Amino acid sequence: MNVVTENFEKEMIAWRHYFHAHPELNFDLDITSAKVAEILKSFGLDVFEGIGKKGIVAALKNGNSNKSIGIRADMDALPVKEESDCEYKSTHEGKMHACGHDGHTAMALGAAKYLSKTKNFNGTVYFIFQPDEEKTQGAQAMIDDGLFEKFSIDEVYAFHNLPGMEVGTFATRSGTITASESLFNINLWGQGGHSALPHMGVDTITVGTQIITSLQSIVSRKLNPAMNGVVSVTKFESDGNENILPGHSIISGDARALSPEANKIIEDSMQNIVEGIANAHDIKFEFTYDTRTNMTINTTEQAAFASKVAEDLVGTKKVDGNCDPKLFSEDFAQMLMVKPGCYILIGNGTEGTHGQSLHSSTYDFNDKLLVIGSSFWTKLVCERLS
Ligand SMILES: [Zn+2]
Ligand SMILES: [Zn+2]
């Protein structure tokens, strides 16, 4: 079956460059969302706007089967100042498509166009365009707004480009593929005072540094080495000054885990460390640990199916169906908490702007992926809804 979308490559490039030049953040996707809806309507899809604020669901039905499939693309950009000379450079100061969601959106639109023309499937495909992947609130907002009640979606798929992987190679796995993300915050209250009279105050910096050092023992000494996790303190602030002892300090950071068990161990260990050290020094404390993104957990059947589709498309050598899990996080996790499905990584390339890290001011999505990625979507739909 020929599912290749190359006839639409020029359009996909034009859409991608339009989105790239007009990046928007989080849920503030007026331009992007309106453009996506307009394009989808031009193909004759049933377009439902305002699902999870600026999210869009577009339905394309063919034949008599009740089977259905959801394809998710993310639409939001990042608060990064673009350092590039490309002709489609961001025109929105301080905002940039530095994660390639411009490309993900263009590929889903390309697949929608192809499938609306060929209709070589039997069932319903739902294209899900989500807001706010970067702050990981968009998927849940769409779910809370009835994504899976208003639309009968059997299973969901999403992919993300990845710099450093050869262009057009695919990687996925059964089980956990990306980590949970938890933000922690530790407030310490002691007693401020004179720097030359420390015995009359309670210094929160001395205690804070002990806590920070001890937090680094969690991954090395509390987690089973076969489990994976990361604990990073990213901020330490106090109200002290040159000759003023700090009476208040705040420590905050970010923790990642590849299983709910590892995440619980990290949280409980943190609580113990903060409580123990703070109590030993007469410091009042408040500790919060907010797991705002879950692990992305692929279901076995759907991961195997996605791998097979990729292998048929680009050859077995370019597909790793059992890749290592990644310690970054992905909002699509929320959808996989509700429905079976699979998250897939696609190589963005290793050279130049395509090999730069995601979220870097010099990164760019690789337009060579547009046909490969959208063809993967069309093949997946045609074979799953055959
Ligand atoms: Zn990102
Ligand atoms: Zn991203």
Image (cartoon, grey):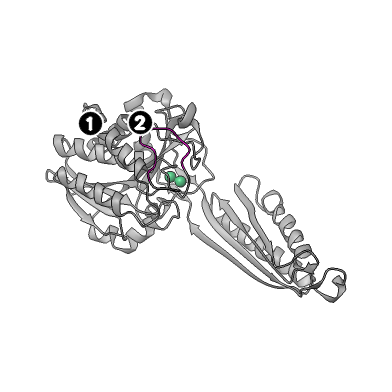
Give the class, few, some or many, for how many residues have Cα within 10 Å of label 1's Cα (few <14, many ≥20): some
Q: Nearer the viewer, residue 324 or 51?
A: 51
Q: Is most of the magenta stretch helix, strand or loop? A: loop
* Res. 303 image quadrant: top left
x, y percent for residue 97: 41, 43
Residue under label 2 = 367
Tag 2: amino acid: Asp
Residue 265, position in %: x, y? 62, 58
In the image, is residue 127 above or below residue 379?
below
Residue in front for this viewpoint, 142 or 247: 247
Which residues fall within the magenta stretch? 82-91
Disc marking residue 8: 1
From the viewer's perspective, is 381 left or right of 201?
left
- Asked whether, in this view, residue 195 is left or right of residue 70, the answer is right
Q: Can residue 113 be seen in this view?
A: yes
Residue drawn at the location 38% of the way across and 49% of the way down: 76
Q: Disc 2, disc 1: CB below 8 Å? A: no
Helix, strand or loop for disc 1: helix
